[in-house]
Amino acid sequence: MELRVQLKVCEGCGSLWFRAQNHCSTYCRECATRLADFPVDTGRRRGPKHRLSTPNLMRTWTVAEAGGAE
């Protein structure tokens, strides 16, 4: 039996560990079990959407630029 492994650095704790070449995990076993308790991000947000409109952003930039030019 042949098993190919990669030497990886855990993104959670920074330790070195071996990962099977056909797996794509980024955390060691200890960090993976610790992070499994956190809720999964669904990508949906609650509440109103806050967007900066371009005119307000341009106006702020212009005022800041004029204040620094004195």
Image (tube, rainbow, N blue to C red):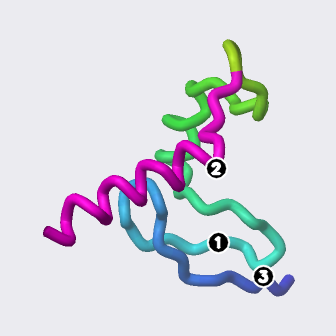
User: Marks 2 and 3, Cα distance to the nearest angstrom?
Assistant: 55 Å
Residue 21 located left or right of residue 39: right
The type of residue carrying mark 1 is: Arg
Q: Nearer the viewer, mark 1 or mark 3?
A: 1
Name the residue at 70% across, 25% down.
49
- Give residue 11's position: percent from left, percent from top: 47, 62
Rendered view: 38 above or below 17: above
The type of residue carrying mark 2 is: Thr
Residue 69 located left or right of residue 56: left
- Give residue 24's position: percent from left, percent from top: 75, 66
The N terminus - image quarter: bottom right
Dot label at residue 54: 2
The residue labelled by disc 3 is 3
Name the residue at 42% across, 49% down.
60
Q: Which residues are magenta?
A: 49-70
The C terminus - image quarter: bottom left
Q: Quadrant of residue 56?
A: top right
Q: Give the total of numbered labels.
A: 3
Q: Secondary structure at mark 2?
A: helix
The residue labelled by disc 1 is 19
Tell me which secondary structure the magenta stretch mostly adopts: helix
User: Marks 2 and 1, Cα distance to the nearest angstrom?
Assistant: 46 Å
Q: Secondary structure at mark 1?
A: strand
Q: Earlier in the sequence, mark 2 or mark 1?
A: 1
Q: Earlier in the sequence, mark 1 or mark 3?
A: 3
Q: Secondary structure at mark 3?
A: loop
